[in-house]
Amino acid sequence: MIVAIQRAKFGAAAHRDEVGVLPTPFPRTLGPNALKYLEEVVQSGLLADMTHRFESAFAEELGVKHCIATPGCTPALAALAAAFPFEPGDEIIVSPITDYGTLQGLIRENYIPVFADTEPGDVNLSARTIEPCITDRTRAVLVVHFTGLVCDMAPINALAAKHNLIVYEDACQAVFSEYQGRLAGTLGFAAGFSFDSEKTMGSDVGGCVVTQDDELAERVRFIGQSRGGVMKPHYGRLHAEPGYAYRMPLCTAAISLAQLEIIREQVVRRDRMIRLLTELLDEIPGVTPLGIPEFVNVYSCWMTGFRIDPSAFRCDAEEFARQLAEAGIPGAGQGKYYLMPEALTFLAENAERKAYPYSTPPASREYRYGPDSCPNAKAFLEHFIRWSTFCEKYTEEHCHLAAEIVAEVAERNRV
């Protein structure tokens, strides 16, 4: 008997029923050359080298040597995980507040994710929270620039250098965010990006890996796109290593290329609007918006939100968010499912029964996962309200309207 389950929705399907008085990302604003590039693909009979054109253009915009385009952000990070020279049971330190796509590749390669807590009242980890997690099995730190807020990378890189660790970035929500004058995705050894339809530079789907390292770029293409296949004369393909076919389709590349041509202007607008909205929300008693650190020069905001002081209101965050959505903020809700030590129930189960790679060996110790393993992250999400419909369509009037709605709901529920 097949048991019916409610499967998760993604992209436009996840936002289809959202309504309100504020803009939503869909229908997306597409670059003026989108149809032209798609027509090139069709008229060429699929011979147009659109994927390479996008890779070259994105690499140039970021100022990196290599861009390897993938079908999405999850495949991008999975290709990176497969390309690294790590062994089953090796530990990768990662943020506890993120999406499953950050971790899927680590898990499939039988690495062990170790969740460093976030800073108190913050959505991101830091060098201070990472350091206690480092062991002799730690091989890398995967930082997540959640909502588009770049982590404080200088101390993280210094700590990693001290312990000879690789640092790489999940920049899926932070395309063209800037940290101390440098772009997200260029602050570590490599990075993964997302161009899924709901993301800041939304295509139909898509993603990429970027790096300055020639050897890593070749490994990502070999393992992540060529399925670990090599050509033997008079024979054909030999598969020297298990690999994947994570190649960006031509039509996705065409739309992504068109979106790249308009994204910088959109990010400037997002940055200006989120800073205004943050100022307005900060004036509401009992409401604390996500802080924008001074080291974030440009905040390419994908998701906006704030925490409520539970002692200031008669309702909890879930009810507060429900009233926001009812009052006209589309997509308002909580994001408790972003707490990975709790949301990835199979990790806790596998660690508990010591399933591979939690068996000894390759694991060197026992692991436990759960909501209490990262108390700062748990406390943050317990009172956090977000809407993932913040987009480049916002104007100053929309920011004021959003703040007014939050203020009205706050006053209605104030103790």
Image (tube, rainbow, N blue to C red):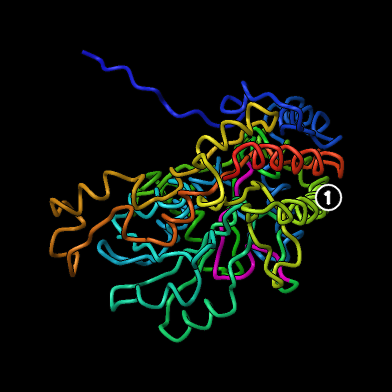
State the residue position of label 1: 269
Image point (46%, 73%), residue name: 166
Q: Nearer the viewer, residue 76 or 351?
A: 351
SS under mark 1: helix
Image point (66%, 31%), residue name: 330
Q: Nearer the viewer, residue 237 or 351?
A: 351
- Dividing the picture into quadrants, the one containing residue 63 is bottom right
Segment tinted magenta in the rendering: 182-195
Answer yes or no: is residue 217 visible.
no
415 with respect to 232 (left or right): right
Q: Amino acid at mark 1?
A: Arg
Residue 90 versus residue 78 in the image, above or below: below
Image quadrant holding the C terminus, namely: top right
Question: Could you say where residue 62 lies in the image, as x and y percent from the top left?
Answer: 72, 62
Question: Could you say where residue 158 lies in the image, as x and y percent from the top left?
Answer: 52, 83
State yes or no: residue 188 in magenta. Answer: yes
336 with respect to 173 (left or right): left
Image point (72%, 74%), residue name: 180
- Dividing the picture into quadrants, the one containing residue 187 is bottom right
Image quadrant holding the N terminus, namely: top left
104 with respect to 120 (left or right): left
Answer yes or no: is residue 191 visible.
yes
Q: Nearer the viewer, residue 316 or 141?
A: 316
Question: Could you say where residue 392 lies in the image, as x and y percent from the top left?
Answer: 79, 42
- Dividing the picture into quadrants, the one containing residue 151 is bottom right
